[in-house]
Amino acid sequence: YLIVPLDWGLGHATRCIPIINHLLSQNHRVLVCGEGSIEKLIKKEFPQVEFLSLRGYRINYSKSRALFWYKMFIQLPKIAFAVRRERKLLASIINQYKIDVVISDNRLGMYNHNVYTIFMTHQLGIKTGTKFFDYFARKINYNYINRFNECWVPDLEEESESLAGQLSHPKRLPNVPVRYIGLLSRIKIDESGRKEYDTAAILSGPEPQRTLFEKKVKA
């Protein structure tokens, strides 16, 4: 198995941890791709797992909400080059390591017709603020998702009980089979009842919005 989390915040990597644990418990060979903080996290959690270097998308957000989508738009060429680079690298990895299955957490280019590929995302419906751009963004997203064999959604199947709401439960789903696999977390409940903190906040994601959000949380 090849696991490839997106570098758009550590949440993509942390929700892959339960999947990696399950695969290892079934005696599967697991490889993980990534860089930077993802590499540090996975190597700490799974020193026995082989890690392969893969450059991330390295997206930056704008400070201004008004300029958010403009900032994203001008970075589209960078994303397109990253997707092309992913496809070339994946073909090489498949040939070298004899991979059977790829689980891609939002890495758009990690599909290949010679192996079984799974795209994992909680964001099937993309909210931009306008219906036209919602449709445009979803069309691009689904164009890539439909190149995979199936799509996993790390959320509950019932929208009323889900965490992502309309993001994971759009009116229209991709054409490939969609499977809601439940909530994924590496955090376990301490059954001892011991309590050290009243509140804990774990923040990650592209700057500068991560730091701006941190300041609001601390205020």
Image (cartoon, rainbow, N blue to C red):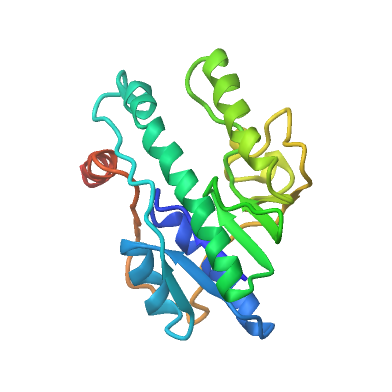
Q: In which quarter of the image is the C terminus?
A: top left
* Residue at the spot 22% in from the left edge and 47% down from the top edge: 218
Residue 184, relative to residue 158: is it above or below? Answer: below
- Tell me where residue 161 appears, x and y as whole percent: 67, 45
- Image side of residue 69 versus residue 142, left or right: left
Task: Judge by depth and name the residue closer to the eye, 144 or 25.
Answer: 144
63 or 74, which lies in front? 74
Looking at the image, residue 147 lies above or below residue 7 = above
The residue under the point 73% across, 29% down is: 172
Q: Is residue 65 shown left or right of residue 80? A: left
Image coords of residue 141 (percent x, y): 59, 34
| Residue at 48% over, 45% down | 84
Tell me which residue sits at (47%, 63%) in the image: 14
Q: Is 81 on the left-hand or right-hand side of 168?
A: left
The spot of residue 71 in percent (x, y) is 32, 26
Observer able to see residue 194: no
- The location of residue 154, given as percent across then percent down, is 62, 53
Quadrant in the picture for the N terminus:
bottom right
